[in-house]
Amino acid sequence: MYDPQIFERGQTHLVINQNIAYRRVLVIQGTPFNRPTMSAYQSISVAKNDDDTEGPDNWGVENANANGDGAIPPSSLLRPDDSKAASCLPPLHLDASTGPRWNSETDLLAGLAEHYEGEIEANGGGGVGGGGSLGGWGKAIRAIHAFRMSYYDMDDELRTMSKIGIKYVRVPVSWCWTEYDPTWLIYTNDATGELTYTTDDDVKEKFACEDPFYDGVYWPAIPRGLFTRFLRACAKYGIGATIDLHTYPGGTSIGTFSGVWPLYSRFWTHGDVPATDDGSMPDVGRTLLKDFIAWMESLETSDPMAFKGIRALSPMNEPAHLAGLYDGAKPILTNKKTFLPPLPPDMASGYLSELNDGLDTHRNLTRVPDGNHLRVMMWLRDAIDAFRQSSLPRLGKELHVNVHESLFDSDAAPNYYAQMQVFGAWWRASTTPLERSKWAVLDMHHYHAWGGECRGSVEGPPTGEYACSDDEAKARVFKKCADWPFAFRGAMESECEKGMRLASAEFSAATHHSVRHACNDVSTLRLMLETQVNMSKAADVELFFWSYKMPYGGAFRNAWSLKHLMYLLGVLPRPDEELFHCGDHIPPAGEPKDGSI
């Protein structure tokens, strides 16, 4: 029997990502809310790759029209069906007959609304609104809410997590929230006793948020009541939740995980530039973060049990991920300046002086270089300060600041270790030693699946550095690559001090990002999990497994669903299995097309 106490023994606490989102190319899992945005739905989706395996292995579409000025309607963008990452959202959306394929939460919401509007029109269009039917947007929100409510059993699953030693969970959410409960989209009129159906205009106002940087693009809202119920359940089972603000208006990164894909990322160009550079527009991003911090603070008195369930806040996920890697070539028709513009020269010079102050007498320390990355660093600096000025640090809550090395271009930081050192230099200037020992945690995600020198595959080189069956080569690669937590800590402590708190809030047991090539034998999966957990424990780097469950992830489940991996290792009695199979739905005679009863 596999020892479930590896979580206690090998890592002070093995934390998990329980959201619903895409990680680069790959489907992930989650809680029912997670950014109600795409994050919260991808996990439930099944994507078909070119090889017809489940779980998206492509990520994006060519977008030649997305760099212009002004709001761009979704219809103007290239969105071929075969580029869509996800194919369903159970239980109401199961295949092409119940809705479209989709790439992100905004893409999903718009596609579902369009699908249902088409069905309504085909049936004569009567009765929409108060007269006897929800409109397309109401039905779309209902489908998303049905997924959230059916996907995750808070009481049972949190109890199970607690029993196997999980102490913390990381929950990706979006910026869009609502005080309303979608359960009451259809309600009984007290005066007449008749059913009343929420109109589409009211649905958009109460259950969605229009993106300020894209006209007509709506995000599905997370019901606060649902989320606080989850936090109370966490507290009940002694689990602390890190709330990860995974997505922002306009999208902070390129790809399905941005929340607006295949629309182009606009958070930095249309949001931060006019707010930061000349103050010509309100600062949407910083205001949203401050408002969220204020809401967290309010829970101390309004809902103490929910407040108890909160461990930490993560202000942004992988900020400007991939900004340093693209130069206008296909498939991402953009460049560094159009995705992440540099700060104005005077502002950049002043910020560099702040970051590198006093280093003339400490020549062994790294200087933060000039570059487009300064815009992200300044935003995160302000996020840290907003948290610092709140009551949350003295109330025992933490701030987990996530950074990603793909932010840098090669001129700023030529290799991975140099990138970590620059982040260390920035962290040194942005936080104090006391804060770094108490509530400020620096987080860098790390996956062997995307590490060229660390990947393993069923067929071996050149697809992977080792073949899954080659124990000698596997042991050699594992020995080299498992040292990453020590390299991370070494780079950070060379710039700061010993004892600072570090985390890697996303890791998995996958040996390769392509499920066709990845090792799926239990012995390799066990070695991947145990090696990373034990080495991170030794280096004192906290880990979060991505993710807890992904029942519609097909072959990806072995290495990316902790629940399924624990089943394979003999810890849990049941697999992470789907209730429905996306793509095989055959409507019975008389079934309403919108999935209603």
Image (cartoon, rainbow, N blue to C red):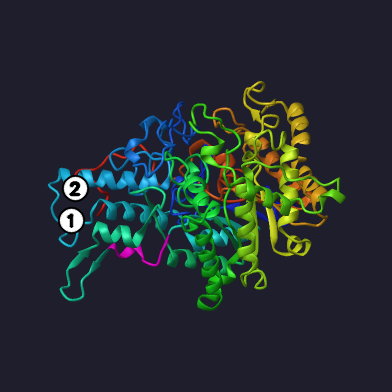
Q: Is residue 179 magenta?
A: yes
| CA gap, disc 2 and disc 1 | 8 Å
Residue 342: in magenta span? no
Q: Amino acid at mark 2?
A: Ile
Q: Nearer the viewer, residue 333 or 307?
A: 333
Secondary element at tag 1? loop
Task: Report whether 323 appears left or right of 73.
Answer: right
Give the image location of residue 488, x and y in percent. Answer: 75, 45
Image coordinates of residue 560 in percent, x first then y, are 57, 42
Above-or-below relation of 48 to 315: above
Residue type at mark 1: give it: Val
Residue at left 29%, top 43%? 98
Q: Residues within 10 Å of mark 1 (few under 14, many from 20)?
A: some
Structural crowding at the residue carrying mark 2, measured as other residues with C-alpha within 10 Å and reported as few (<14), some (14–19) or many (≥20): many
Q: Which residue is mark 2?
A: 120
First in residue order: circle 2 vs circle 1 = 2
Under tag 2, what secondary structure?
helix
Q: Look at 74% across and 60% down and name the residue there.
A: 436
Question: Residue farthest to the front?
Answer: 346
552 and 498: which is toward the camera: 498
Residue at the bottom extreme, as displayed: 301
Q: Quadrant of the C terminus?
A: bottom left
* Pointer 2 with pointer 1, Cβ within 8 A: yes
Residue 168 appears in the rendering: no
214 with respect to 368 (left or right): left
Q: How many marks?
A: 2
Task: Read off the residue under disc 1.
Answer: 128
